[in-house]
């Protein structure tokens, strides 16, 4: 990892150069009082003073709906796979969302490589920036407060009048050489980078009351904790938490047929484990009919099943689910209650 320094006054020129010379560029832009990742036509539209966006940038790597094949029926049926992966640059990604991309890389690239995700991932340049925590963030508890090596091409950290820029790939190095005026980082720059990161970590006020690495073991003993029934009675099964989560990757697949009943396409679209019919199978049987079982499953996916496999939390601590939950259910309160119950039982 190479560290360079770019003056803040030079950032707009870099962004404009990327817009003019490289792939289409998207980044955080204001939408009323909120922020979304959207297309940029000039540097002035980029809004870096945001806490979080409504949806994570995963929507560009794993779209809400995408065509995976087109087909024709008839005497000689035809089917053609569709893999659409236009070049794209995403700028302004926070560390928690880079961790989310790390999780998607595991989900779509480890046991069974997904050609659609993999093609988009290879065609996308990722440029990260430091975050601005709020009371919902608990990234320090799950280890996603620092940029995830291997996920970004460039990562910018505020060090006062300049940015320290971590170059994470050959693609990132080439972008800096082509479009940015920068200098080598000094020891003073590095010390300032570490100090600024400590200050930012101190702004995170929501915390888990145990080391995240102990949670898979804790979850072995809390399957029947009454808390699940209590939270299940509150949960509306609206799926908001699934839709805004940077690591949820469940999807459904269906066919859309034209009125001629000959031409059509197979599409996949986001699905969510909190939705009432998510676990409904052939014959109309639903093996997670109760809300509490679906809610419990979501937590086990984030903090037990996949943690056991990969050794890291599949929750990034971004706080989106907490901000968007109509029933005010949030991971820190839920997990801390389970920790307290486990400690009480061990006494």
Image (cartoon, helix red, strand yellow):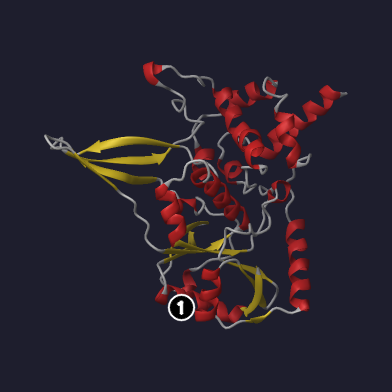
Q: Which residue is at a point 74% across and 63% down the rendered structure image?
A: 197
Q: In this image, 212 relative to 86: left or right?
A: right
Q: Which residue is nearer to you in this view: 265 or 323?
A: 265
Quadrant housing residue 211: top right
Residue found 58% across the figure and 33% down from its top: 298
Image position, residue 177 (x, y; %): 54, 80
Residue at 62% across, 33% down = 305
Please provide percent x and percent y for residue 77.
17, 37
Query: Considering depth in this image, is 14 or 326 the residue closer to the camera?
Result: 14
Which residue is at the front of the view, 96 or 322? 96
Can you say whether 23 is above or below 345 in the image?
below
Where does label 1 land, which residue? 17
Q: Is residue 103 above or below residue 25?
A: above
Label 1 sits on a secondary structure element that is helix
In the image: residue 46, left or right of residue 203:
left
- Residue 38 visible? The answer is no
Query: Which of the 4 image quadrants contains residue 214?
Result: top right
Q: Quadrant of the C terminus?
A: top right
Please tell me which residue is depicted at 32% across the width and 41% down the height of the picture.
267
Name the side, left or right, on which 20 lies relative to 319: left
Q: Residues within 10 Å of mark 1 (few under 14, many from 20)?
A: some
Point out residue 50 in the picture as x, y percentages from the top left corner: 58, 60
């Amino acid at each position: 990892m190479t560290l360079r320094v770019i003056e803040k006054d030079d950032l707009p020129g870099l962004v404009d150069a990327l817009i003019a010379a490289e792939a289409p560029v998207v980044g955080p832009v204001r939408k009323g009082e909120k922020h979304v990742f959207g297309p940029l036509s000039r540097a002035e539209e980029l809004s870096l003073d945001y806490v979080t966006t409504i949806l994570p940038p995963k929507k560009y790597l794993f779209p809400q709906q995408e065509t995976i094949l087109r087909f024709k029926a008839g005497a000689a049926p035809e089917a053609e796979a569709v893999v659409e992966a236009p070049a794209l640059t995403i700028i302004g990604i926070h560390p928690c969302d880079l961790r989310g991309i790390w999780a998607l890389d595991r989900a779509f690239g480890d046991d069974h490589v997904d050609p659609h995700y993999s093609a988009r991932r290879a065609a996308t340049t990722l440029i990260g920036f430091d975050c601005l925590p709020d009371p919902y963030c608990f990234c320090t508890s799950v280890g996603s407060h620092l940029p995830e090596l291997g996920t970004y091409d460039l990562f910018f950290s505020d060090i006062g009048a300049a940015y320290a820029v971590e170059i994470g790939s050959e693609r990132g190095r080439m972008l800096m050489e082509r479009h940015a005026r920068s200098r080598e980082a000094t020891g003073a720059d590095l010390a300032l980078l570490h100090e600024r990161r400590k200050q930012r970590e101190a702004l995170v006020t929501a915390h888990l009351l145990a080391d995240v690495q102990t949670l898979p073991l804790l979850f072995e003993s809390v399957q029947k904790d009454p808390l699940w029934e209590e939270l299940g009675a509150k949960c509306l099964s609206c799926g908001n938490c699934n839709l805004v989560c940077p690591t949820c990757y469940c999807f459904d697949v269906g066919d859309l047929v034209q009125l001629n009943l000959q031409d059509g396409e197979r599409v996949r679209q986001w699905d969510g484990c909190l939705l009432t019919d998510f676990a409904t199978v052939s014959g109309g049987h639903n093996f997670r009919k109760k809300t509490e079982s679906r809610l419990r499953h979501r937590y086990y996916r984030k903090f037990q099943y996949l943690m056991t496999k990969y050794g890291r939390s599949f929750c990034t601590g971004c706080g989106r689910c907490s901000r968007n939950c109509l029933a005010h259910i949030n991971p820190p309160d839920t997990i801390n209650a389970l920790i307290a119950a486990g400690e009480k039982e061990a006494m």
